[in-house]
Image: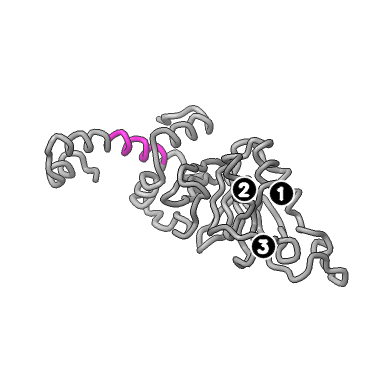
Amino acid sequence: MRLWKHDKDLFRIAKNELFTALVGDVLDKMGYTHQFLPAHLKPLDVSMIVIGRAMPVLEADVFEEVSKQSHNELLKKPFGLMFEALDDLKEDEVYICSGSSPRYALWGGLMSTRAEYLGAAGAVVDGYSRDTNEILKRKFPTFSIGTYAQDQGMRGKVLDYRVPIEWDGIKICPGDIIYGDRDGVLVIPQGLVDEAFKGAIEKARGEKLVQKALENGMSTVEAYNKYGIM
């Protein structure tokens, strides 16, 4: 039996009761042991939480803003399909981008403004973000490998969006759930969402019992033997 009615209900529970470690532990028990994106991926502010359905974006390096001699029409277009990808964001979706080298920023202030207007849940990029003060002012959940002002204009283009991408060996498909906090960012495949979050909610509620027992002097051995949680 599901403990939530719809995505918004699940996302509210995740923000209020859960944290990524809980869901990651459950995925481990399910046999999915490589669902955390790399550890150097961090939120711009430690209080930021991102959770929503993945809108994957495929980025690639280029070496000029407009390639007039190119046989590929996309290379003749500044930023490739970045504007189209951004405008296609839906409510509670996460702009999640990978595919390029870490030489420039993949997310910025104006992108955050547009994404926020569309009701998007946040941005997670395999590269840098910039316009940090503006993003922090908006409090738009943004996770990146760091901040760096270098523009992607003549260095990178979006090749496609709403297509599967891969990041550190983890496949990310449209509609997967992206869940991130200060301790990491998880990719939860669509088919695992119900089991993973049901287990995490039950674990979270069980951990409260363990915490109370430990506060009352129970040993960790006793607590684990009684509750099976630690």
Horizontal placement of 15 versus 112: left or right? left
Asked whether the beta carbons under mark 3 and mark 2 sit within 8 Å of each other, the answer is no
Asked whether the beta carbons under mark 2 and mark 1 sit within 8 Å of each other, the answer is yes
Q: Earlier in the sequence, mark 3 or mark 2?
A: 2
Looking at the magenta stretch, what is its main secondary structure?
helix
Q: Which residue is mark 1?
A: 85
Quarter holding the N terminus is top left
> Is residue 121 at all visible to an observer of this figure?
no
Secondary structure beneath label 2: strand
Image spot of residue 170 (x, y percent)? 51, 59
Secondary structure beneath label 1: helix
Q: Is residue 200 magenta?
A: yes
Viewer-nearest residue: 2 or 138 = 138
Q: Is residue 154 magenta?
A: no
Residue at x 23% of width, y 37% of height: 211
Viewer-nearest residue: 115 or 45 = 45
Viewer-nearest residue: 171 or 116 = 116
Amino acid type assigned to the residue bearing label 1 in the image: Ala
What numbered label is drawn on residue 95?
2
Q: Earlier in the sequence, mark 2 or mark 1?
A: 1
What numbered label is drawn on residue 121?
none
Magenta region = 197-206
Q: Residue furthest top?
A: 5
Which image quadrant is residue 105 in?
bottom right
Amino acid type assigned to the residue bearing label 2 in the image: Tyr
Q: Which residue is mark 3?
A: 150
Secondary structure beneath label 3: loop
